[in-house]
Amino acid sequence: MAGVVTFLAVWEIGARISGSILIFPGPVPVIRQFIALVPTERFFRALGGSLLRVLLGILFSVPLGLAVGILAGLDKRIHAFLSPFFAVIAATPVMSVILIAFLVFGSERTPVFTAFLMVFPVMAANTIAGVRAVDPKLKELFALYRISREATVRRLYIPAIMPFILGGMRSSLSLCWKVVVASEVLVQPLLALGTGMQRAKAQLETPELFAWTLAAVIAAALTEWAASLLLGRKR
């Protein structure tokens, strides 16, 4: 609570220093605008569109990241083959990816593709780290008893890398929201939180811009909380 109060106080001080609601509104007008925005149909439709894109990005990137991560962790040749791809993705600005994807996929599919491209390497890297962290003595034990590779992956590697997977999924969900909303601001699909931000900015409705941003932050926090509960129960 002390942190929240301090944050709001600093926000209010910054708003008073700016002296203009068009430049930097304080928490009161933003919260008032947020309360007015939430019950509207356009808000729920925009929230649903953004949430669907986030879920699709996670749905495509997480399983593929796990599969590729396990293979790359077990086989150094596969890891060496994929290393240039991971390096290029890490070095490419997100905005460049969004603009290039927009030319290929259009406004509706660009946020999903960009989220996939950003989240997939994170999940793969976490999985590779988990595979490499498996106790070598356990590997030798499984090899000694000639346990099949499939059974070794299922009984040794999957349980050992589970903490890495859970951590990667939490990080991926947060990253996915950021990338999806950033893509929506640039390409402006029909129903999206980012589109609401861009339109509010174009109309100089700064409190509404902050309200859309607050909505995106709350939506990301709630989905992360729900994912933590779900993943915590499955551990």
Image: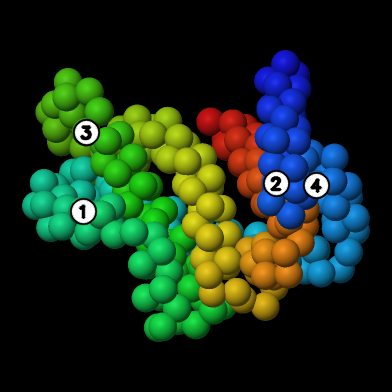
10 Å crowding of disc 4: few (<14), some (14-19), many (20+)? many
User: Of callouts 4 and 1, which one flags the residue occurring earlier in the amino acid sequence?
Assistant: 4
Looking at numbered disc 4 in the image, what kind of residue is underneath it? Val
| Viewer-side label of 3, 4 | 4
In terms of depth relative to the viewer, which is nearer, 55 or 130?
55
Name the residue that disc number 2 marks: 24
Dot 2 or dot 3: first in sequence order is 2
Mark 4 or 1: the one toward you: 4
Q: Determine the CA span between mark 2 and mark 4.
A: 10 Å
Q: Going from the N terminus, do you reach mark 3 or mark 4 first?
A: 4
State the separation of the CA atoms marked 1 and 3: 19 Å
In the image, which disc is placed on residue 132?
Answer: 3
User: What amino acid is found at the position of numbered circle 2 in the picture?
Assistant: Phe
Q: How far apart are marks 2 and 3 (CA)?
A: 48 Å
Q: Nearer the N terminus, badge 2 or badge 4?
A: 2
**Closer to viewer: mark 2 or mark 4:** 2
Residue at horizontal 41%, vertical 83%?
Answer: 103
Instruction: Tell me whether circle 2 and circle 3 mark residues in contact (CB < 8 Å).
Output: no
Secondary structure beneath dot 2 equals loop
Secondary structure category for the residue under label 3? helix
Rendering coords of residue 192 (x, y %): 67, 68
Q: Mark 1 points at which residue?
A: 87
Give the mark nearest the N terminus, 2 or 1: 2
Query: Considering the numbered disc 4 on the image, is that residue within a helix, a strand or a loop?
Result: helix
Assess whether mark 3 and mark 1 are in contact (beta carbons under 8 angstroms): no
Residue type marked 3: Arg
**Mark earlier in primary sequence (1, 3):** 1
**Front-most of residues 160 and 221:** 221
Looking at the image, is mark 2 or mark 3 nearer the viewer?
Answer: 2
Would you call the spot at circle 1 few (<14 residues within 10 Å), some (14-19), or many (20 or more)? few
